[in-house]
Amino acid sequence: MEYEAVIGLETHVQLNTKSKMWCGCANAYGAAPNTQVCPVCLGLPGVLPVPNEEALRKTILTGYLLNCEIPRFAKFDRKNYFYPDAPKNYQLTQYDKPSTANGFVEFEFQGGLSRVRITRAHLEEDVGKSFHFDRNSGVDFNRAGVPLMEIVSEPDITSADMAYEYLNALKDILLYGGVSDCDMEKGMVRCDVNVSVRPVGSTGLGAKIEIKNMNSFSGVRRALEYEIPRQIEVVKKGGKLIQSTRRWDDTTGITEEMRTKEHAHDYRYFPEPDMMPLAPTEEWLADVRKLVVELPLARKQRFIREYALPAADAETFKNDVALGNYFEPLAKQSANPKALANWVINNLRAKLTETNEREKTEQAELGIEPADLQLTTLADLKFPPAALLELVALVEAKTISSAAAQQVFAEMYATGQAPAAIVQEKGLAQVSDTGAIEKLCDEAIAASPGPVADYRAGKAAALNALKGYVMKLSKGKANPALAGDILERKLKA
Amino acid sequence: MPNALSLNQLSISELTGRLARREISAREITQACLDQIARVDGTVHAFISHNPADALAQADAADRELAAGVTIAQKPLLGIPIAIKDVLAVKDHPLNCGSKILGKFVSPYDATVIEKMRAAGAVIFGRLNMDEFAMGSSTETSAFGITRNPWDPARIPGGSSGGSAAAVAADEAIATLGTDTGGSIRQPAALCGCVGLKPTYGRVSRYGLTAFASSLDQIGPFTKNIEDSARVLGVISGLDPKDSTSVDVPVPDYVAALDGNIRGLKLGVPKEYLIGGLDPEVKASVDAAIQQYLALGAEIVDISLPHTDYAVATYYIVATAEASANLARFDGIRYGQRVDGADPLELYTRTRGAGFGAEVKRRIILGTYVLSSGYYDAYYLRAQKVRTLIRNDFLAAFKQVDAIITPTTPTAAFKIGEKSGDPLQMYLSDIFTISCNLAGISGISLPCGFTTNPKLPIGLQLLGQPFGEATLLKLAHAYEQSTPWHREKPGTLA
Ligand SMILES: [Zn+2]
């Protein structure tokens, strides 16, 4: 019998608000332990939570970006459990009335479009972080009370690769919406996976097994690549899977059972009495809708459609938003957006990367911390964006050859000088003077008896060798098309 | 005057007048309270602790402000010593909630009501005894010893704000703050013979009040008379950005509302409150009060609050459920007393086992049970539905009447130890006060007589509309001014 996997993901994302969820403490990564705390986020006696409106706004915005419904009534609940990193020993979360529900994410997968339904994206609070030393433990509460959004998918995912692509698509959407910095290394995105297996064609669900402790998207993929065959193996051998929670070990690459259903927590959820329910007004929602941005996939499709770009180029502009934003206004003015995209991706981006690498090395030598590096960005370029249009136009008009264009670009990148001025100054204009080119063609024919004979024997490609000779004689300035025409005429004569 | 009252026996209104006229100093008032504490608190034990030097320093600061021309209009509590229930956070003061579990905890911040009273010039002093985490009706569950009723030291002062009521009754403070979750202000006020006001839920910020039951708790004043109650309420009320359950309703001039004119106001008498356990002397006093209201020109209307019978059960589900979560933070990890263990679970078990008293444990267990998977719908959810019915009862009644009149308690103060072995009997002593918190409305208790032998205070309860404190105070004031009860002082301590 053939088996298939049924996978659902719970993705926790820290929102990039200025302050924490219930208090004014900074929501910032990397401060010394317990320096970003106050009576509220430490859960001292008598404190009360006041919801951060920015966090609510970013949650609703996420709802819109994930095509969710926005219920007109939502609330926070207390999820009760004792753990040293939980200051109140209950976590505020949205249990049965989330702020957003019933959406979907669309993304490219295996050459087509896939859709994963979103059950809900709800808001909750992050907890502190435990540290264990030789003889004791400590808790850093800087992270306690940071707004955390949980995005729950329906079990629409069928493979490890699909889970990986879904997560990347989700991350792109969150980055586009500006709701989270999604920095995995700083723990801003954390995933739990629910996976079960069933015979292909069956619609029932197998025992749901939850996997925890993956700290990267590739970790999720690896965990599933391990877990799915494991479950199929168990079932094929006639074994029985039971609902349980397993822990992924990134080093050994296996999952291990943590607890089974009988030991599941009873979280005793109940509505948070310290806060009023949330009832967003139409006016407020309309303001949030103004923050809705174009989704990554839509942007890619639009770039392909509107600028006739190859998919790979559009993908580049989807992933590098700044580069795409640099490209788009120029493309609207360009007669040849595809050529422009080539320049932006293959020349400009390459050059900028090269500059950044050099800057990194130089600044590292000066002892500057990685976080404080000052790198050149698209906004710091010495030439105005329109100069790139001008450069492409010069090539299009055959005023300069593409070889010369490379030189012009290098110069304008270095100095900011206008392309036309560079062409003039360096004498890079193509020679289209028939008399001058005729002379060079005669020289080339005289010096290349082999290719001449080949061409006359019917090998059309031999013309290229002669053309190259002419270009070399002209130091790259001869108009190659014109040279070709003249050579052809002379050889056929 | 041969029988002149000492300063600690005077009301806020009297003292602020004399301060304004520079007849007395704030230091003298505070000193008078401290002297009275030294004289009687060995018996009463209203205070868990107090810091005389700190109180006098605040009084001196008030005197300097008075000398600099600050007026009572600018700072309505300037120089008035007000003592605080041990459940409210006062910066740099101990905060124990009547419990062992907080150990040597000192609050690093002020509750909003404390900030407001400081801004109004009050001298904030002392930690008043209470039932542990406000769970109790007698102040017997405190980890800091029992508080005695100033009218009879063999009897309880009521609870949970027993220290707050006893301190006012024994003239150890001019006014005090307490909290009321199911009657914890009104019941001890009734049993100690002072005025206790429970404001509408949302009227006063709860920020800095260590929560027992978040959806029921309110902070309110204990005072020697109604006018003082109005003065303190005016100071502590209002929207607070730190408490999202506080409500943006304008704060009226409560003192100005005390014009004595209650002609035509309607008082409802709920038939469900004439229960079997009602003491005949209490009933007689309340009946006499009703007659007095008629004489003052009010109308008396028979009303019904049909869901009254379910109030106690509903209360003990909602309150304990919320408490089970609210008290989870007392775990020995971040602050308070810790009893170490091999792992977090053992640390929690030992810390909470040693730190909480029996009544608190009983309620945490009850609350945990009613929220448990499989029981939630039958208990918690159902209780919430009944709670709505109870609130609707009151809202319907308030379409007919301006306030509701009832006894505050079924009996006068009972003896120490009399009910502490029987939680259910203890819970039933709150039968008249509990509905008010479930409905989120306002309520006040004021003296309406005494039992004869022994002489113990009897309390009259008035229940008002949501944010109807001005009408409530006006009604209470008119009655108070036409009766002698509020002028009586307990004799045994003098
Ligand atoms: Zn904080």
Image (spheres, coloured by chain):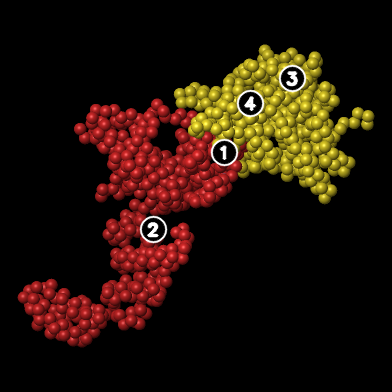
Chain colours: A red, B yellow
The alpha-carbon separation of the residues under discs 4 and 2 comes to: 59 Å
Disc 4: which residue: B135
Q: Nearer the viewer, mark 3 or mark 1?
A: 1
Amino acid under disc 3: Arg
Residue position for label 3: B155
Disc 3 under 8 Å from ligand 1? The reply is no
**Which residue position holds label 1?**
B334
| As drawn, B436 above or below A168 | above
Q: Residue furthest right?
A: B2
Would you call the spot at circle 4 few (<14 residues within 10 Å), some (14-19), or many (20 or more)? many
Give the mark toward the camera: 1 or 4: 1
**Residue A320 coordinates in the image, percent (x, y):** 37, 58
Label 4: which secondary element: loop
Q: Which mark is residue A186?
A: none
Amino acid, disc 2: Val
Q: Are marks 1 and 4 on the same chain?
A: yes
Circle 3 — which element? loop
Classify the position of the N terminus of chain B by image quarter: top right
| Disc 1 element | loop
Task: Kindly identify the amino acid type of the residue bearing the numbered disc 1.
Answer: Arg
Checking the image for residue A321, the label placed there is: 2
Chain letter belonging to callout 3: B
